[in-house]
Image: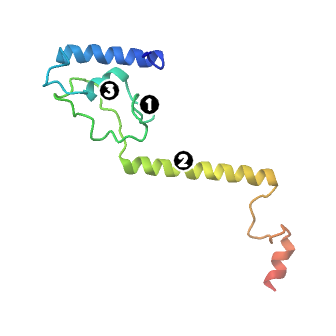
Amino acid sequence: MGGYIDKRSEVVMAKYSAEYSKKYGDASTSDAPPRDYDLWFEATGVPTHGHVYGFSPLEDLTGIIGQSSSASTSTGQAPELYTHEDLLRILEQEKKKWQEEVLQKMREEIGFGPRHADRGSNGDSSSANHASL
């Protein structure tokens, strides 16, 4: 069976394999690393939204950059990576934003708007005055 999930996967793997072979020759040599992350980053291009193609968005890549057997020869800037804490903070912010959006939609659907400080629970401004008496 084999094959690739899409054309991009095939192109990235072909580019990575070619660069790996140029750099290390026969992959069966014991001094060649099983993976060269610097070559992978070159093959996949710049990360989008902090995500490196072929890696899980939640995968911590901070310890991977620069871990190949030799220093990177790339002249480009290193991709921006996030720490585990950064990702958790971002996810929490996105979750809060999503919850607020869903809550607002639910309130609109049932016709319940935000309460105003000068109004009572039934929306009547006179009930707030009576409550203070």
- Residue found at x 77% / y 70%: 118
Residue 11 shown left or right of residue 132 in the figure: left
Numbered disc 1: secondary structure: loop
Q: Which labelled disc corresponds to residue 48?
A: 1
2 to 65, vertically: above or below: above
Q: Which labelled disc corresponds to residue 106?
A: none
Numbered disc 2: secondary structure: helix
126 to 103, vertically: above or below: below
Colouring style: rainbow
115 to 100, vertically: above or below: below
Kind of residue sitting beneath label 1: Thr
Q: Earlier in the sequence, mark 3 or mark 2?
A: 3
Kind of residue sitting beneath label 3: Phe
Q: Quadrant of residue 81?
A: top left
Residue at mark 2: 94
- What is the CA distance from the residue labelled 2 to the residue labelled 1? 17 Å
In the rendered image, residue 51, in percent from the top left (x then y), is placed at 42, 34
Q: Quadrant of residue 110?
A: bottom right
